[in-house]
Image (cartoon, rainbow, N blue to C red):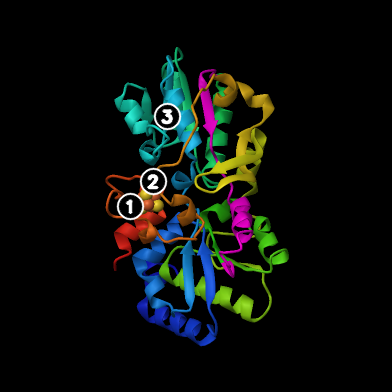
Amino acid sequence: MKHVDEYRDSALARVLVDGIRQVADRPFKFMEVCGSHTVAIFKSGIRDLLPRNISLISGPGCPVCVTSVEDIDKAAAIAGMDGVVLATFGDMVRVPGSRVSLQKAKADGADVRVVYSPFDALKLAQSDPSRKVVFLAAGFETTSPAVAATLGRAIEAGVKNFLLLSVHKTIPGAMRALLDTPELGLDGFICPGHVSTIIGTAPYRFIADEYRRAAVVSGFEPLDILQSTLMLIEQIREGRPSVEIQYRRAVSEEGNPVARGVLGRYFEASDANWRGIGVIPGSGLKLKTEYAAYDAERVLDIKIGESRETRGCICGMVLKGIKNPPECRLFGKACTPETPVGACMVSFEGSCAAYYKYGAR
Ligand code: SF4
C-alpha cells in the first residue's frame, strides 16, 4: 500500500476484524505504550470494533504525562533563578508540579520560554550569553538524539551558557516494570512505532525471551493496529512469543545506529522517576560526567521542597493501565483539557485527554 487512505480502508478493516474474531478464543489483554497509538485507537474506534474478549489498554507512552512532579518542581525552581531562562516544549508548561506549573511560574515572574525544538533553545542561549538557558529535555528515544545533536552543536560552537535538565526516559525499562506488575496480566505489547525507528527490535527481546509475552512493533493507521493485534494473538496461540515488526515501512530490526551513536556520545543510562510509577532502574538518560558543565543539575544549586502528587489524581494507575480515566472522580469535572489537574490530561496524547476527547463515542 502506498497512500494513507489505503491504511484506513473499511472493507480491509472488516476482513482483519473477522480474522481476529476467528482466532480470539479466550480473553487477551494487550497494552499500547505509545501515546500516538492511544490517540489512533480512540480516533478510529478500534476498541469498539474488536470482540469483547480483546482488551487494549493504554500505557505510559506520553512523555509529558510521565514527567515526575519532582522534575517539574526542579524546572520551576530553575526558572525562578536570577539570570536563568527555562526553555521547553509547549505542553510541558501546563504540567502540574507540587506547587506550580511552569505556566504559573511564568505568570509569577519566572522566565519560561516555549520553544519548538532544542535548537531554538540553543539559539536563545547564543543570542544572550549573559544568561544561562536551561532546556528542559523531555521525551523518549525519538526525541533524545536531537537533544544530543544540539548539545554537540553547542560544544562545537563554544557556547557555555546552554544547559540541559534531562528528564529523558527510555521505553523498554518501563515495559519490564509493567510486566513485573502482576495485577496487569498482560499478554503482550503493541510496541511504539516511532521509538522503534531508533532502537530497532533488540531492546524488546526480553519480552519474549524472559517473560514469554508477545510483541509487535506497529504503525499508527487503523489497519496497522488491527493487523498488529492479529499478529499478537497468533504469536500466543501458536506458542511462539517473539518480537515482530508490522510497521515495516518505517522500522527495521537494527533501528537507526547513527541516531543511537549521537545519543551514546553524550548520554548514559540512569534511574528515572516516572510520574505515578516511581523510580525505574536504568530507564532514564543523564549526561555523561565529561559533559557535566552542560548539566543543569550539576551546575545549578537547585533547591525544592518535598514533592507531592496532585490530590485526587490517579495518573499513576492510569499510566500503569490499572485504571481507566473515567474511574478518576475528577475526570471531566474538575479535570478537563482546559483545566488539567493531572499530567495525563495535559497533552493530546495523554490517556485522560484521549478518553475525554474520543472516549464517549
Ligand atoms: S482525569 Fe485528571 S486528575 Fe484524574 S487521573 Fe486523569 S489527569 Fe489525573
- At x 63%, y 76%, the residue is 235
Residue where numbered disc 3 is placed: 87
Q: Is residue 284 visible?
A: yes
The answer to whether residue 111 is left or right of residue 225 is: left
Is 159 drawn above or below residue 180 in the view shown?
Answer: above
- Tag on residue 105? none
Residue 355 left/right relative to 244 = left
Tell us which disc is closer to us: 2 or 3: 2
Q: Is residue 180 magenta?
A: yes
| Mark drawn on residue 330 | 1
Nearer to us in this view, 313 or 158: 313
Circle 2 packing at 10 Å, graded few (<14), some (14-19), many (20+), is many
Is the distance from the Cβ of mark 1 to the nearest ligand 1 atom less than 8 Å?
A: yes
Q: In which quarter of the image is residue 183?
A: bottom right
Magenta stretch in the rendered image: 159-188
Asked if ligand 1 lies within 8 A of label 2, the reply is: yes
- Does residue 17 belong to the magenta stretch? no
Q: Which residue lies furthest to the top in this view?
A: 130
Residue 176 x %, y %: 64, 56
Question: Where residue 41 sits: x, y (%)?
Answer: 41, 65
Provide the residue designation for mark 2: 342
The amino acid beneath tag 2 is Gly
